């Protein structure tokens, strides 16, 4: 829990609403399991006393954010209004959505937009080709930034020294046998990606999935997001990704630079 600081660097307790912080943590706990949970389960996941969790759940239930049958609790669709507020007010998602749709149509593959959130990447928009069924990551899906193409493309905005400091502090758990976790190798990989203007990550985040991504820059050249195309390794080779998909991603990213503030 990080409390806000004044301009002089000192924490001011009156600027921090602890009950709101606890309520948000409790809502986030629902994402840990795909089913309704008991009060004790939710309290444990949120790291809150059972009595405190109960009061917060009843408050959220009163506001329409949580439902309960008397024993189990679950979030309601009303929770989506919180995510909707972000997506509707986010300039990057609004500007990139038609770009993602165009890339997906041209490539006949799903294209996605991600931003950095702490040590993770979060996917905030996607474009899909016209198909009866399509897979891919959902909006709101999170992955570690260090082992994903979109993450490395965005981490390229950091200097080598900043990358070294970041990887000395961040947890780097191997998600597959191919996941790079060594700080020196990660820094070298991101530096190489920065130089060539794109990142291609092969089976590091998921065992049978590879992805290619390019950074999205705003008007002043600062990297603010990344767009990608990913596919199962049995369908798309790395060579095809660079030949077919990279030009589409680059054109899409370059086309919005002047628009993003």
Image (spheres, rainbow, N blue to C red):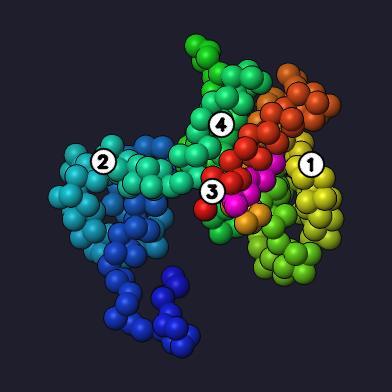
Circle nearer the N terminus (4, 2): 2
Residue 61 in the image, given as x and y percentages of width and height: 19, 48
Mark 1 residue element: loop
Q: Which residue is mark 4?
A: 99
125 sits left or right of 81 in the view: right
* Mark toward the viewer: 4 or 2: 4
| Residue that badge 1 annotates | 178
Q: Residues within 10 Å of mark 4 (few under 14, many from 20)?
A: many
In the depicted structure, whether residue 10 falls above or below residue 107: below
Q: Which residue is mark 3?
A: 260
Instruction: Single out the mark in the foreground, 2 or 1.
Output: 2
Residue under label 2, please give it. Answer: 78
Between 116 and 197, the residue placed more toward the observer is: 197
Q: Earlier in the sequence, mark 3 or mark 4?
A: 4
First-in-chain label (2 vs 3): 2
Residue 142 is at least partly visible in this image: no
Q: Nearer the viewer, mark 3 or mark 4?
A: 3
The residue sitting at 18% across, 49% down in the picture is: 63
Q: Secondary structure at mark 2?
A: helix
Question: Where is residue 148 drawn, in percent x and y?
Answer: 68, 44
């Amino acid at each position: 829990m990080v409390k806000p600081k004044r301009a002089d660097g000192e924490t001011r307790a009156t600027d921090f609403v602890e009950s709101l912080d606890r309520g948000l943590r409790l809502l986030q706990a629902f994402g840990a399991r795909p089913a309704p949970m008991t009060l004790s389960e939710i309290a444990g996941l949120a790291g809150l006393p059972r009595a405190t969790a109960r009061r917060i759940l009843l408050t959220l239930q009163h506001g329409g954010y949580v439902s309960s049958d008397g024993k189990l609790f679950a979030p309601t669709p009303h929770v989506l209004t919180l995510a909707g507020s972000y997506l509707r007010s986010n300039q990057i998602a609004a500007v990139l959505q038609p770009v993602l749709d165009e890339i997906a149509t041209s490539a006949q593959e799903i294209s996605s937009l991600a931003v950095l959130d702490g040590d993770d990447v979060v996917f905030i928009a996607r474009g899909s080709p016209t198909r009866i069924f399509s897979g891919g990551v959902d909006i709101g899906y999170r992955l570690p930034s260090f082992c994903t193409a979109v993450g490395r493309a965005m981490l390229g905005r950091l200097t080598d020294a900043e990358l070294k400091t970041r990887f000395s502090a961040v947890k780097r758990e191997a998600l597959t046998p191919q996941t790079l976790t060594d700080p020196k190798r990660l820094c070298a990989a991101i530096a190489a990606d920065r130089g060539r203007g794109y990142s291609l990550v092969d089976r590091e985040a998921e065992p049978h999935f590879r992805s290619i991504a390019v950074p999205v820059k705003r008007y002043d050249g600062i990297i603010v997001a990344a767009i990608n195309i990913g596919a199962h390794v049995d369908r798309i080779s790395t060579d095809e990704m660079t030949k077919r998909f990279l030009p589409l991603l680059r054109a899409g990213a370059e086309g919005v630079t002047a628009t993003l503030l």
